[in-house]
Amino acid sequence: MVQSALHIDTTEITRLAQAFGGTVADRIVRDELTTAMVLSNEDVRDAVNARVKHKSGTYRRSFKLRVQVSGKSIVGVITNNARSLAGFVYAWTLEHGRGPVFAKRAKALRFVINGRVIYRKSVGPAKAQRPMEYGARDAEPQIVRRFDVARDKIAARFESLR
């Protein structure tokens, strides 16, 4: 399994909101920041998908997005546990790479590529592509914009409370 998380400490802004408008203001802050986090998770997922060549679509469909809200923080978590039909977790291999593979129980490894069967005694290492790491970095400007919009919406909603 591959996982990425974005953590926002909301202690200070929650305290300010409660001082300004009590529980109504606190709810406004929490709602807007949660919305920004949900959209940010989707931005990261889309940026990661843009970095990976999709053959079967299993990797694309294997993303799980969730947002955890507590009194002190909001955390966006993205996980991918993509597996091959044989149960091999290749999301981890895409992120971290793998060493060479040798045939152990048979004389050769068997692969089907574009309908052709290929046999090899071994295959070389696979370099780490780091789609989750680089995708999160690619999505950073969008994430900043999402929270800027949330800030502006919070300010506008606070103005309506006056």
Image (cartoon, grey):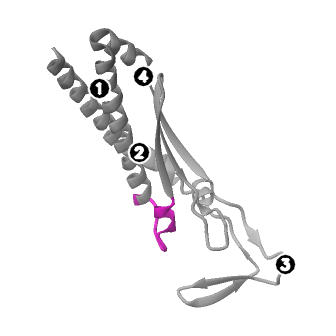
Secondary structure state at the residue bearing disc 3: loop
54 in the magenta segment: yes
Q: Residue at x 41, y 48 (%)?
A: 44
Classify mark 3: residues with Cα within 10 Å, few (<14), some (14-19) or many (20+).
few
Distance between mark 2 and mark 1 Cα atoms: 20 Å
Mark on residue 105?
3
Q: Which residues are magenta?
A: 50-62
The mark closer to the camera, 3 or 1, is 1
Disc on the earlier residue, 3 or 4: 4
Disc on the earlier residue, 2 or 4: 4
Mark on residue 83?
none
Secondary structure state at the residue bearing disc 4: loop
Disc on the earlier residue, 3 or 1: 1
Residue 122, how many percent across, how many down?
74, 75
The mark closer to the camera, 1 or 4, is 1
Q: Is residue 62 left or right of residue 104?
A: left
Q: Are marks 2 and 4 in contact (CB under 8 Å)?
A: no
Is 128 located above or below residue 153 in the figure?
below
* Residue under label 1: 28
